[in-house]
C-alpha cells in the first residue's frame, strides 16, 4: 500500500510567474486524483484513463478492482497507458484517499445527501483553487451498483451530473470525463472581455440622427415620434453599443438622408463605415 505518492504538490496560491510566459495558476491538476472503486470492466478503466489524460488529470487509483487490466484496457486508453501503469490499487477507499484533504463522491442517485449535492461545475469552481495546496480525490463507483452509501458518506462532498431523471446513470468513463472536464475548465482564469461602451453624449447625437433620418422617410409617426424612439432606444441599450458601432448607425442614417435628398442609386452614395 503506497500513500507517499500522494503528497500535495504545492504551487502556492496566486504565485506570480514571469510576466508573459505563464499564466498565474488558479488550480493545480497534479493534485487531483481519480479513484475508481471496484471497477468491473477493463475497457472502462482504459477509457477513464484516456478521458483523464485529455483533461490533464494524471493520477488514477483503484480500490479492489474486480478485473485485471487487459489488452482492451490498453486499447481503450488509446495512448494514456502511462496513467494505467502508474495507477495504484488499495484495499479500501479510506486508504486510497488517505492523503486527500478534499474528497468528492460521484453518484447518479442523489439519495440521502441530495441537499449537499453540487453540480460538477459548482464542485469544480469550489475546489479548483484548493488544489493549489491540497490533494483532491474524485471517487467513482462500480458500473453495476455505484458507490455504496457508506462510501458516499465517507466523502465530504457529493456531486451528481444532471441528466434525464428517468435515465441518470452514465457510463463510468463518461462520468470521469465530465468531472475532469469541469476541473480542467475551472483551472482557466475567467476572461472578462473588455468592453468600452459609447458615452451618453455620443448616443444622444446618434439618436438625434436616427430621429431625423427616420422622420424624413416617414417611418416615425409625426404625431408621436417619441414612442417609436423609445422602443429604438431600448433596443440599442440592450445591444450596448460602443463608439464605433454608434458611428456606424450614424453612417447608415447619413446614407438614408443623402439617398432621400438625392434620390440617387444606393451604390453611388457616400459611404461611412463608422470607423
Ligand atoms: N448503476 C449505478 C451507476 C453506476 S455508473 C447507479 O445507479 O448508481 C458508475 C459510476 O459512474 C457511478 O458510481 C458514478 O461514480 C458515475 N456516474 C454515473 N452516472 C453519474 C451521474 N449522473 N452523476 C454522477 N456520477 C455518475
Image (spheres, rainbow, N blue to C red):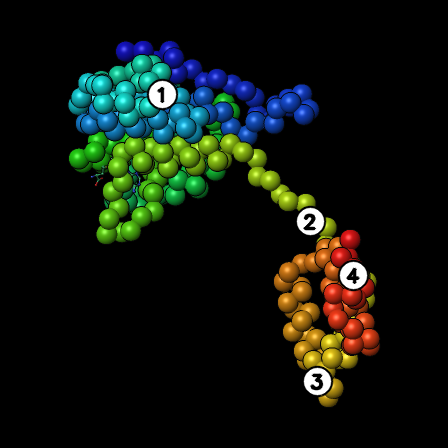
Q: Nearer the viewer, mark 2 or mark 4?
A: 4
Q: Earlier in the sequence, mark 3 or mark 1?
A: 1
The residue at 78%/73% (across/down) is 264
Quarter holding the N terminus is: top left
Q: Nearer the viewer, mark 3 or mark 4?
A: 4
Residues at marks 3 and 2 touching, judged by CB atoms closer than 8 Å: no
- How packed mark 1 is, by other alpha carbons closer than 10 Å (few <14, some 14-19, many 20 or more), is few
The residue at 31%/28% (across/down) is 48
In the image, is the residue at mark 1 within 8 Å of ligand 1 by its beta carbon? no
Q: Examine the image and state in which quarter residue 49 appears.
A: top left
Q: Position of residue 178 (x, y in %)?
A: 37, 37
Instruction: Determine if residue 203 is in view.
Output: no
Q: Residue furthest bottom?
A: 223
- How packed mark 2 is, by other alpha carbons closer than 10 Å (few <14, some 14-19, many 20 or more), is few
Q: Which residue is mark 1?
A: 79
Q: Earlier in the sequence, mark 3 or mark 2?
A: 2
Residues at marks 2 and 4 touching, judged by CB atoms closer than 8 Å: no
Q: Position of residue 50 (x, y in %)?
A: 35, 26
Residue 85, placed above or below residue 208: above
Q: Which residue is mark 3?
A: 221
- How packed mark 3 is, by other alpha carbons closer than 10 Å (few <14, some 14-19, many 20 or more), is few
Q: Nearer the viewer, mark 1 or mark 2?
A: 1
Q: Earlier in the sequence, mark 4 or mark 1?
A: 1
Q: Which residue is mark 2?
A: 195
Q: Position of residue 60 (x, y in %)?
A: 33, 21
- How packed mark 4 is, by other alpha carbons closer than 10 Å (few <14, some 14-19, many 20 or more), is few
Measure how far apart labels 2 and 4 are at the Cα level. 26 Å
Q: Which residue is mark 4?
A: 271
The residue at 38%/27% (across/down) is 52
Measure how far apart labels 1 and 2 are at the Cα level. 42 Å
Amino acid at each position: 500500500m503506497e500513500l507517499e505518492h500522494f503528497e500535495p504538490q504545492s504551487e502556492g496560491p496566486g504565485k506570480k510567474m514571469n510576466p508573459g510566459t505563464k499564466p498565474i495558476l488558479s488550480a493545480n491538476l497534479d493534485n487531483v486524483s481519480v479513484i475508481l472503486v471496484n471497477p468491473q470492466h477493463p475497457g472502462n478503466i482504459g477509457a477513464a484513463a484516456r478521458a483523464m489524460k485529455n483533461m490533464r488529470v494524471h493520477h488514477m487509483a483503484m480500490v479492489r478492482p474486480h478485473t485485471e487490466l487487459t489488452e482492451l484496457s490498453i486499447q481503450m486508453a488509446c495512448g494514456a497507458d502511462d496513467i494505467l501503469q502508474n495507477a495504484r490499487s488499495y484495499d479500501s477507499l479510506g486508504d486510497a484517499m488517505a492523503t486527500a484533504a478534499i474528497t468528492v463522491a460521484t453518484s447518479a442517485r442523489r439519495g440521502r445527501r441530495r441537499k449537499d449535492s453540487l453540480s460538477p461545475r459548482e464542485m469544480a469552481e469550489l475546489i479548483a483553487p484548493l488544489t493549489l495546496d491540497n490533494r483532491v480525490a474524485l471517487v467513482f463507483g462500480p458500473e453495476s451498483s455505484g458507490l455504496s452509501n457508506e462510501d458516499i458518506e465517507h466523502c465530504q462532498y457529493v456531486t451528481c451530473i444532471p441528466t434525464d431523471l428517468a435515465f441518470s446513470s452514465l457510463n463510468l468513463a463518461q462520468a470521469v470525463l465530465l468531472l475532469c472536464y469541469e476541473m480542467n475548465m475551472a483551472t482557466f482564469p475567467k476572461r472578462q472581455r473588455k468592453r468600452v461602451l459609447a458615452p451618453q453624449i455620443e448616443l444622444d447625437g446618434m439618436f438625434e440622427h436616427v430621429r431625423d433620418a427616420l422622420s424624413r422617410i416617414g417611418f416615425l409617426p409625426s404625431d408621436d415620434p417619441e414612442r417609436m424612439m423609445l422602443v429604438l432606444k431600448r433596443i440599442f441599450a440592450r445591444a450596448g453599443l460602443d463608439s464605433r458601432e454608434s458611428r456606424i448607425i450614424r453612417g447608415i442614417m447619413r446614407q438614408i438622408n443623402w439617398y432621400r435628398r438625392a434620390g440617387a442609386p444606393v451604390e453611388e452614395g457616400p459611404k461611412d463605415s463608422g470607423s
